[in-house]
Structure formats: C-alpha cells, structure tokens
C-alpha cells in the first residue's frame, strides 16, 4: 500500500464515518430490531382492534319458538332502535330452544311470543336481549290492541337530518392521529437520546474513545453519533408512519384518508 | 525525528513529569522503560493529545504534533479500547478509515493485518468473544492498520504468548525498516534489549538514562572483563597495571579495569601465560542498568 491512498479527512467526512458506523451497528442490533418489530406489531394490533371494535358494534342472536314474520320484524326493528343486529333462529319446541340457550347458540329464546304470557329463556337475567324482547313484545301487543280497536295506523313521516358540522368526526380523527403521532415521536426521541448517551458511555468505558480522539475532535465524534442515530430514528419514524397510514387505509379505519396523511406528514415534519 | 522536548505535567500536587526529553530517529525502535508510575503512559498520552502538558512539546519533523500529525500516528493505549460488539474485520476497517483510508483499501488493509497478526480465522468474530491475548492482537492491528508514519505503543507486549511476541516484534521491526520511528513502553527488559536501538529509562519524572543499549553499557560504572587462561599461574592478572581482580576461580578471573587501561594490554599479558580460551567484556544486562539507574535517582531523591 502506498501513502498516496491516504488522504486526510475533512471534518464532514469524519462525522459521516462515525454516523455510518452508528447506523450499521445499531441496525444489526437485536434489541433495536426486536423493539422496532414490537412497535410495528403494536400499531397493527391497534388498527385490528379498532376494526374489531367498530365493525358491527353489537349483534344479538335470538331464538323464537312459534314465531312469525311479524315477530321477526318487530324484534329486528327494536334491535335497530337499540343499535344491535338481531338475527332470529326458529326452534321447533321449548326444549330445543332451552338447549340452544344453554349451548350458547343464541343469547335468549322467546317462547310463544303471541300468547298472553310470552316467556323469555336466558342464561341469566339482565342484558340487552331482555330489554329488546320486552320492547318488541310490548310493541306487538299495542299494535294488536290498536288493530283490535279498529285504529288504522299510518306510517310515521321520515325524518330529514341536517348535519351542521359534518367534519366533526374528521377533526376528532385528526386529533387522535396527531396525538398518537406525537406520542410515538416523543418516545422515539427519548429512545434515541438514550442511544446517544449509551454509545458515549460504551466508548468511554471500553476506552475506545482514546483511539477515536487521536483521530478526531470530540465534537466530530458527538456530531457523528447524533446525526447517525437521528437519521436512523427518522427512518424508523417514517417506516412506522407509512405502515400505520397504509394499515389504516387498508383496514378502512379512517373516513378521510387525505386528511390522515396530511396530519401524519405534519407530525413527522 | 520524533522529539519529546521538556515535558512537564502535574496532577494536583503530584508532579508526574519533570522535563522529559528524548528523540527518536526515523526507523529507530525506542524502548521506554521505567518503574510503575514513572510517567511513561502520561508521556505517551501527551503525545497523542489525550493529556495536556504543563510545559514542553512533542514535535514530529520539527513541527509540533497536531491533529493532522496524530492521524498518522498509530497508537495503542495502555487501557485497551475496542468496540466489544463489533467484528474484528469491521473494527479494523473502521479504524483504517478513520485514519484516512478509503473504503476499499481500508478493507484490504484490515484483512492483511488480521492475517499477519494471526487473526485471519477470527475476522468475523466479535471482539468480546476473543481471548484477552487475541484482543491484544486486534488492538495492535488497529494501531498498525493505517500504515502510520509514527508508532506509539503503550505496553504492546503485555499479555501476549511467546508466539504473539515474536509476530508483534517482527511486525514492529518491519515498520522500523520502513523508516517509521517506534516508541513502546515495556517492563520486559530482555525484550527491549533484544529489539530496541535506543532505550530511555524514566524514573521520578525524568529520563535518567537514554541512548543505545551499547552507550548505556559503556556509561555504566564497573565494566568487568572475564578472562579464562587455563595455563596461567595464580595471581597473573594482579601484576598487570591498573587492573583490579574481582574474583579468581582457578583459571577463570573477572577483572575490573581502571580508567584508561587498554584491554589489549590485559590480553597480551594473558597470552604470555599460554592459551586463552575466553576473553570478553561481561556486558551488564539492561535489567542491571535499569536497576542501577532507578536506584541512583532514588538515592538522590531521598
């Protein structure tokens, strides 16, 4: 080797060298990889949780013995009023319905709804099924009594809804996204601050710093560290943001994708 | 020329260096000896800019050693320093790059030096997995990998097995042949005696003796001449003027010559008695010189 291959470094080159080493060591560090993986899984898990919570809300399975189309309609209408999807399963006799409730196939079973004394079979009393069926049976009885009295019912007028602040939802959404973003950013900042401190301590305790300081000034060493770890942190943040946004769009969690991306970009920047 | 000129350094009340001066010529191997705490490490740290001298300076080619010069110095600190989690090869490449090599030559140099110090197979291992002796070799390779213009090594031989000592010695001698001045400190005086062109003995913050091993010997008091003349009658040597007999065992006599006495005269006198089977100066070993130098200053200091 000849000395012609050796050129003195500029400070910028030294800083870049240090930064490069920081990134390449950290990126192969098991702890870092596992940490990033956990963070990503956590975000995806949150999305999935959101989807699970939002999708469908509640559903109630009701068994009916001796039902009819009118009974099913009444139950489902009552379900809509209580914000739950009602599906009706027909049973042939009370014994079958009893089994269905015991096995958990249905939440509750309604026996002889049109009789004078309808009976509801439940695992234990209380819960939405009870309220729901009570309302439906009452409604049916009232309709029946009105019909018996010869009252002709007209269908009620449809309500027209005017939203004064249609963006309210989107605003909340943006606020939540911003909040999550800030929390993630904050923890990453703390984490990378710690990485820098850790790296300095490591070099100091392993005495490697004596060799390093023979070739560069302390500020170059520190600048390289901060720069390298900062870039790495930013890259990690971007990966998380991209995965979070892509996941949110894919799972259809948000209503206004454009605003979500805008908010995320603002938080990262 | 690597010049250490009048270095003074005190830590609080403890005056560590009191005017340490010596020079190392290009291609010269300088052995730096001294008892524990004599200031060897401090001297080297001052040269590397890790400690600041209270007075005096270190010069290379007539210019004070600065950042740019230090980048061309291969340094091995007393406290070993390597990245424990970095692989040997990457470690060496990194240090080579820090000293100004480009990526490709740095990788090549790392490979070469790992190979030469017997670390070829361990190149892919993390440093923390190596034995202490092998870590030592990595440390050396880190100092040598940038083909430096000057080498300053603090206790490079400590902890090495004899094979490691030989391969390191060979590597250092080769650097000397390349014209690189090498300064290293060591307590293994036999090694210093074998390898070094020049020796400096540091005691109580001062260089108490320096020069080539030969110069140190000639300057030492009480040079002794051993003569074996089997046929000589007892007491032959006492008749030679200016000679004091130290010991006489049958034909084997040890003599001390007074100032200005010609050893050839002694030889002639010995030959006059008959056969001479042995005639040589008893060279004091460096250990003896070291002891003499260090105890002298103790006496002065006390």
Image (cartoon, coloured by chain):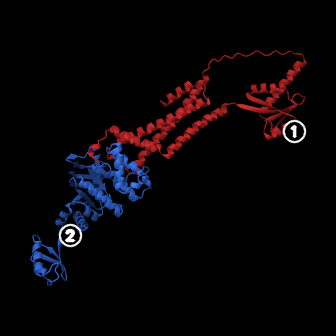
Chain colours: A red, B blue
Q: Is residue B210 above or below residue A178?
A: below
Q: Observer-nearest residue: A146 or B88?
A: B88
Q: Is residue A35 above or below residue B4?
A: above
Helix, strand or loop status at disc 2: loop
The percent position of residue A123, horizontal first and vertical second, equals 80, 39
The percent position of residue B41, horizontal first and vertical second, equals 30, 55
- Does any portion of residue B154 appear in the rendered image? yes
Read off the chain for label 2: B
Q: Which image quadrant is residue A254 in?
A: top right
Relative horizontal placement of residue A160, taking residue B175 as reference (left or right): right
The residue carrying mark 2 is B283
Q: How many labels sit on residues?
A: 2
At a point 39% along the width and 50% down the height, the residue shown is B89
Circle 2 Cα neighbour tier, 10 Å, few/some/many (<14 / 14–19 / ≥20) = some
Q: Which mark is residue B163?
A: none
* Quadrant location of the C terminus of chain B in the rendered image: bottom left
Circle 1 Cα neighbour tier, 10 Å, few/some/many (<14 / 14–19 / ≥20) = few
Helix, strand or loop status at disc 1: helix
Relative horizontal placement of residue B179, taking residue A226 as reference (left or right): left
The percent position of residue A216, horizontal first and vertical second, equals 33, 43
Q: Which image quadrant is residue B216 in?
A: bottom left
Disc 2/disc 1 C-alpha distance (Å): 117 Å
At a point 81% along the width and 40% down the height, the residue shown is A102
- Does any portion of residue B39 appear in the rendered image? no
Read off the chain for label 1: A
Q: Is residue B257 above or below residue B200?
A: below
The residue carrying mark 1 is A95
Relative horizontal placement of residue A34, taking residue B94 as reference (left or right): right
The percent position of residue B87, horizontal first and vertical second, equals 42, 50
Q: Observer-nearest residue: B235 or A117?
A: B235
């Amino acid at each position: 080797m000849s000395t012609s291959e050796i050129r003195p470094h500029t400070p910028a080159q030294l800083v870049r060298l240090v930064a490069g080493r920081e990134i390449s060591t950290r990126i192969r560090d098991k702890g870092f990889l596992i940490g990033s993986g956990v963070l990503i899984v956590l975000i995806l898990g949150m999305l999935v949780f959101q989807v699970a919570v939002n999708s469908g809300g509640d559903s109630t399975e009701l068994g009916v013995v001796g039902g009819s189309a009118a009974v099913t309609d009444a139950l489902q209408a009552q379900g809509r009023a209580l914000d739950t999807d009602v599906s009706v399963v027909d049973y042939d006799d009370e014994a079958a319905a009893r089994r269905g409730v015991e096995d958990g196939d249905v939440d509750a079973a309604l026996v002889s709804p049109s009789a004078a004394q309808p009976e509801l079979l439940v695992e234990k009393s209380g819960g939405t099924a009870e309220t729901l069926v009570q309302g439906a049976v009452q409604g049916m009885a009232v309709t029946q009594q009105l019909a018996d009295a010869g009252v002709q019912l007209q269908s009620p007028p449809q309500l027209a809804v005017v939203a004064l602040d249609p963006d309210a939802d989107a605003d909340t959404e943006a606020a939540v996204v911003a909040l999550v973003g800030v929390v993630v950013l904050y923890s990453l900042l703390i984490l990378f601050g710690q990485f820098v401190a850790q790296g300095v301590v490591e070099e100091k305790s392993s005495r490697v710093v004596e060799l390093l300081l023979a070739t560069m000034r302390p500020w170059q060493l520190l600048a390289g560290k901060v720069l390298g770890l900062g870039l790495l942190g930013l890259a990690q943040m971007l990966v998380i943001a991209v995965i979070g946004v892509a996941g949110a769009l894919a799972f259809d969690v948000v209503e206004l994708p454009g605003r979500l991306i805008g908010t995320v970009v603002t938080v990262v920047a | 020329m690597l010049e250490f000129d009048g270095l003074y350094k005190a830590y609080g009340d403890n005056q560590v260096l009191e005017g340490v001066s010596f020079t190392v010529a290009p291609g010269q191997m300088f052995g730096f000896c001294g008892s524990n705490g004599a200031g060897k490490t401090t001297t080297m740290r001052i040269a590397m800019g890790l400690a600041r001298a209270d007075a005096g300076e270190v010069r290379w080619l007539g210019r004070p050693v600065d950042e740019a010069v230090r980048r061309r110095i291969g340094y091995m600190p007393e406290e070993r320093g390597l990245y424990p989690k970095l692989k040997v090869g990457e470690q060496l490449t990194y240090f080579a790059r820090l000293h100004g090599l480009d990526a490709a030559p740095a990788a090549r140099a790392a490979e070469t030096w790992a190979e030469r110090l017997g670390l070829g197979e361990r190149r892919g291992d993390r440093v923390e997995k190596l034995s202490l002796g092998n870590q030592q070799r990595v440390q050396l390779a880190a100092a040598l990998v940038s083909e430096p213009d000057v080498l300053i090594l603090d206790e490079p031989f400590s902890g090495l097995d004899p094979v490691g000592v030989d391969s390191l010695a060979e590597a250092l001698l080769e650097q000397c042949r390349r014209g690189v001045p090498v300064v290293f400190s060591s307590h293994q005086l036999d090694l210093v005696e074998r390898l070094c062109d020049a020796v400096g003995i540091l005691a109580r913050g001062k260089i108490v003796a320096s020069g080539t091993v030969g110069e140190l010997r000639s300057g030492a008091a009480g040079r002794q001449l051993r003569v074996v003349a089997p046929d000589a009658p007892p007491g032959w040597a006492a008749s030679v003027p200016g000679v004091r007999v130290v010991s006489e065992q049958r034909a084997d006599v040890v003599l001390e010559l007074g100032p200005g006495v010609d050893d050839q005269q002694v030889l002639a006198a010995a030959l006059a008695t008959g056969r001479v089977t042995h005639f040589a100066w008893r060279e004091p070993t460096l250990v003896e010189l070291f002891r003499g130098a260090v105890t002298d200053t103790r006496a002065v200091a006390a």
